[in-house]
Image: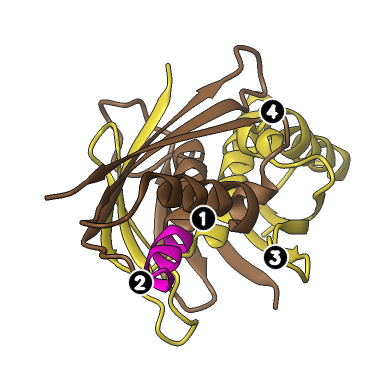
Chain colours: A brown, B yellow
Amino acid sequence: MDIKISMSYIDDEKFSVKNNSGNNLIVDMYAENKKEHMSPMELLLSALTTCAAVDIVSMIKKRRRDFKDIKAISSGKRVDDSPRYYKSIDIKYLIFSSDLKDNEAERFISLAISKYCSVGATIRPDTILNHCFEIIRD
Amino acid sequence: MDIKISMSYIDDEKFSVKNNSGNNLIVDMYAENKKEHMSPMELLLSALTTCAAVDIVSMIKKRRRDFKDIKAISSGKRVDDSPRYYKSIDIKYLIFSSDLKDNEAERFISLAISKYCSVGATIRPDTILNHCFEIIRD
């Protein structure tokens, strides 16, 4: 099934978007101190981070490991000249689990970002996708 | 400057994301009839559509053409096998203007999507980005 959205204009740097289920999102391109909503490049970074997170949680649970929480911090570096696409993206996942092993976390995150995630697979192949993680045992 | 976001877990298919300015976004991967928020692939389509729209409006105004409104309908087709990346994206812009010419609209939209937009430039080169438009004169 196709994915569909519709967009409406609010002002020159602010737009409203609606998906097929009627869920709304507002996007703005205001300067950082004036922003009220995500910008398009922040949406893209958010899409990648959350898309992979769903798969990571699913793999941890399938492996029957303890799972309490997951957080992430992501940053994207852009090329200097227009169009300023992402030359690299770094995602750090913090996974709260009493028994998840390091090599399992590494494999799950790597598979999620580079193999399973539809957003990651839609990104140009020369954008470097780096990841790291920390397992919090408490 | 790097673009940064942080992500928190709400449930296995629902995450909260915050940008550097503290603006929040919730993403869910629920089935269509249960959805409350955009999914990651909808975010990506929204990012592309709005990113290009900003540039289109800017070019119309720089050309000193009348501009009343802009809307868009976008749809993305995914490949059948996982990872289900976008094989093609179609965007139709509706531009409300009394004097914008067809060849200007075509050029502005084409430049925005294929040349200026950072999101478009971050998408894999074999994803086909189609566009069309309609100018509404009323």
Upstream in sequence: badge 1 or badge 3? 1
Helix, strand or loop for disc 2: loop
What amino acid type is highlighted by mark number 3?
Ser
Residue at position x 61%, y 48% from top? A120
What amino acid type is highlighted by mark number 2?
Arg
What amino acid type is highlighted by mark number 1?
Leu
Foreground mark, 4 or 2, reads: 2
Tag on residue B116? 4
Question: Residue A133 appears at what percent x and percent y?
Answer: 36, 39
Quadrant assignment for the N terminus of chain B? top left
Report whether residue B93 is seen: yes
What amino acid type is highlighted by mark number 4?
Tyr
Q: Nearer the viewer, residue B77 or A13?
A: B77
Q: Is label 2 in contact with label 1 (beta carbons under 8 Å)?
A: no
Q: Nearer the viewer, residue A91 or A28?
A: A91
Q: Which residue is mark 1?
A: B43
Horizontal arrangement in the rendering, residue B97 relative to residue A97 (left or right):
right
Upstream in sequence: badge 1 or badge 4? 1
